[in-house]
Image (tube, grey):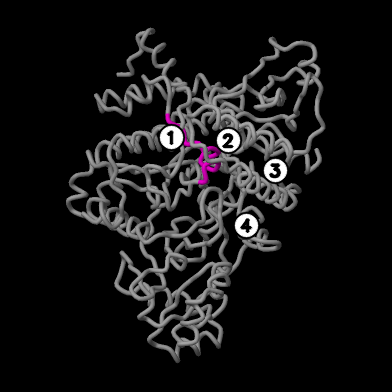
């Protein structure tokens, strides 16, 4: 298979899956329903057929399996048909037709904003398309490595080849040019050092949960790596502090007028590259090394997927107070109560400040670094992704390894593995929600699964940006730390938290995992969804009369974050008010009919 064909298929697959699921368009045509012309085209595989409004064109593509969860795997590039004849269109032309169709739908339905950002989204799609090409060029020769049974944290962070499966521009990075893309991309397995500024202490601010002087701690850790010039500068400027920056960001900020002013006033000196060689993780801007004492989450003025990735002061406060909670006696009790769920904390942050105002573009957040190369841990997005050229995934490799060790039946392995996951990760998330009012936007990229003997053993949750406290259940915590409500802005009402739980933990996290397990052929979507429904029914008995279970089990639709529609309306998830930062749509709830059937069959999951 040619690289261009793979690139076209994957880039259009993400866009078209998002289009169909968010707008509820398109239909599946099973093999038994296809006429002779369709059978010849599909090679006796199920077909996805999508109308391209306002034209009379149809888009058709063979898929491996019909799915009620939205994410289907294309077996080849989509083809556009007009009057029954195929059209020889480029991938960019097909993308243009899809985006034109979405814009037409928005304008004609009166259900969405009339804002039309289709040209902007097309530009971002083309950037993402080119980025995917760079990744494939770098990785195709060894692409089977991404489905190996044993992979460590850094390896899996750099293995997310084509990104969020329901996002139109998963590899969009507006701001990186030419060689910068490969130089700073996790998927190209890059490594590089941070840049450091030496800043007069009046112009630096920050905080650290574990001590009083994060600047001295950072300097102590970096001392073995200093060059003679850097040592000399530090000795000559004892009232100055080190400030770490992403090397791209350092160059970008050194072109700003305020930097030139501080430089001329000798308040700031660029020291260049220093310290550990760090690997970019899935977010691009968070860097990690097994040798470093922390991970580094850095502001980066590059538009990655939906937003320019700038750290905000309120996010630093969220991380600081969350770390306080988990380091406290209360946090120690939580760890004992939930031994299979852990939070990766952000205990410190540093930034430049001018006239008392934090310069967000300079914020560096220090994150706990709990892993070593021997620990088998993976973000769920990498674990669940399809192999780009073969109908397999890493979960199937894990199942095969388990079978080699145990000789169990395929269906038993798949069922037991998913059941283990629900016990290890999902149940603690629900319990923390209702017992303590703690909520996490634990989407697949922010959820890390630790494996033991190829089975789930621990779920790690990261990224304080998505940590929240439910007002109705976290009253004692909010009373103890009122800054959670004002400074950190992370207290939300239950109805809002329920919607986010339904999307991040159910629709994104669990449905994505179910899709990946079903793709192995060792269990069906229906079987896995039934396991989830049974677990939800049992949890509802533990926490009765809660609106979340009403939503998940008895409502016809679920809220789903429309990444494509969010892009079409030009929303920025980091800067917009939390209530309006994303477009949410209602999608069919696959749990409801299974729940009704279980009730009719007398299943109560006591």
Nearer to the camera, 561 or 553: 561
- Looking at the image, residue 532 sits to the left or right of residue 402; the answer is left
Between label 1 and label 3, give the one nearer the viewer.
1
Q: Position of residue 216 (x, y in %)?
A: 38, 77
Name which residue lies at 37% across and 57% down: 315
Which quadrant is home to the C terminus? Answer: top left
The alpha-carbon separation of the residues under discs 2 and 3 comes to 13 Å
The alpha-carbon separation of the residues under discs 1 and 4 comes to 28 Å
* Residues marked 2 and 4 touching at CB (< 8 Å): no
Between label 1 and label 4, give the one nearer the viewer.
1
Dot 4 or dot 3, earlier in sequence: 3
Query: Which residue carries the number 1 mark?
Result: 503
Between label 2 and label 4, give the one nearer the viewer.
4
In magenta, the rendered stretch is 559-570
Is residue 345 on the magenta stretch?
Answer: no
- Check residue 185 in the rendering and tell me which mark sits there, or answer none: 4
- Check residue 144 in the rendering and tell me which mark sits there, or answer none: 3
The relative height of residue 357 versus residue 383 in the rendered view (above or below) is below
Element carrying mark 1:
helix
Q: Residues within 10 Å of mark 4 (few under 14, many from 20)?
A: many
Name which residue lies at 38% across and 59% down: 346
Dot 1 or dot 3, earlier in sequence: 3
Element carrying mark 2:
helix
Q: Position of residue 144 (x, y in %)?
A: 70, 43
Dot 1 or dot 2, earlier in sequence: 2
- Check residue 395 in the rendering and tell me which mark sits there, or answer none: 2
């Amino acid at each position: 298979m040619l690289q261009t064909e793979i690139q076209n298929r994957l880039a259009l697959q993400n866009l078209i899956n998002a289009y169909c699921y968010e707008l509820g368009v398109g239909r599946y045509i099973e093999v038994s329903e296809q006429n002779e012309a369709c059978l010849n085209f599909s090679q006796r595989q199920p077909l996805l057929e999508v109308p391209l409004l306002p034209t009379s064109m149809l888009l058709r593509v063979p898929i491996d399996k019909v799915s009620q969860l939205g994410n289907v795997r294309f077996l080849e590039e989509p083809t556009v048909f007009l009057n029954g004849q195929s059209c020889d269109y480029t991938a960019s032309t097909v993308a243009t037709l899809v985006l034109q169709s979405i814009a037409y739908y928005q304008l004609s339905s009166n259900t969405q904003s009339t804002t039309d950002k289709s040209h902007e989204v097309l530009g971002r799609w083309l950037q993402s398309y080119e980025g995917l090409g760079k990744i494939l060029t770098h990785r195709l020769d060894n692409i089977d490595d991404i489905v190996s049974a044993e992979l460590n944290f850094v390896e899996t962070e750099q293995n997310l080849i084509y990104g969020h499966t329901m996002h139109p521009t998963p590899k969009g990075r507006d701001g990186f040019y030419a060689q910068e893309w490969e130089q700073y991309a996790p998927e190209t397995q890059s490594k590089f050092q941070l840049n450091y500024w030496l800043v007069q202490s009046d112009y630096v601010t920050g905080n650290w949960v574990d001590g009083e002087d994060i600047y001295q701690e950072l300097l102590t850790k970096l001392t073995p790596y200093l060059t003679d010039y850097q040592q000399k500068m530090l000795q000559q400027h004892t009232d100055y502090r080190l400030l770490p920056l992403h090397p791209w960001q350092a160059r970008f900020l050194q072109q700003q007028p305020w930097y030139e002013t501080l430089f001329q006033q000798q308040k700031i000196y660029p020291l260049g590259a220093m310290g550990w060689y760090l690997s970019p993780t899935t977010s691009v801007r968070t860097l990690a090394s097994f040798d470093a004492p922390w991970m580094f989450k850095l502001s980066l003025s590059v538009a990655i997927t939906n937003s320019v990735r700038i750290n905000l002061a309120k996010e630093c406060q969220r991380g600081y107070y969350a770390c306080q909670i988990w380091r406290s006696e209360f946090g120690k009790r939580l760890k004992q109560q939930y031994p299979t769920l852990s939070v990766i904390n952000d205990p410190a942050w540093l930034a430049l400040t001018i006239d008392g105002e934090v310069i967000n573009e300079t914020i560096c957040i220090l994150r706990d670094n709990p892993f070593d190369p021997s620990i088998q841990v993976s973000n769920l997005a990498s674990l669940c992704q399809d192999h780009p050229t073969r109908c397999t995934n890493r979960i199937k490799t894990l199942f095969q390894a388990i079978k080699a060790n145990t000789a169990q039946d395929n269906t038993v392995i798949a069922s037991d593995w998913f059941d283990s996951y629900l016990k290890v990760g999902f149940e603690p998330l629900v319990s923390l929600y209702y017992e303590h009012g703690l909520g996490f936007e634990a989407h697949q990229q922010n959820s890390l699964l630790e494996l033991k003997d190829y089975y789930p053993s621990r779920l790690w949750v990261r990224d304080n940006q998505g940590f929240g406290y439910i007002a109705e259940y976290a009253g004692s915590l909010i009373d103890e730390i009122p800054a959670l409500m004002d400074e950190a802005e992370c207290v939300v009402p239950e109805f809002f938290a329920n919607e986010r739980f339904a999307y991040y933990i159910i629709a994104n996290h669990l449905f994505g995992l179910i899709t990946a397990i079903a793709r192995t052929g060792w269990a069906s979507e229906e079987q896995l969804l039934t396991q989830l429904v049974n677990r939800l029914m049992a949890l509802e008995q533990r926490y009765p009369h809660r609106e979340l279970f009403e939503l998940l089990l008895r409502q016809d639709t679920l809220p789903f974050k429309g990444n494509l529609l969010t892009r079409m309306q030009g929303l920025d998830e980091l800067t917009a008010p939390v209530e309006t930062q994303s477009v949410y749509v209602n999608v069919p709830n696959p749990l409801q009919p299974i729940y009704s059937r279980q009730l009719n069959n007398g299943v109560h999951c006591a």
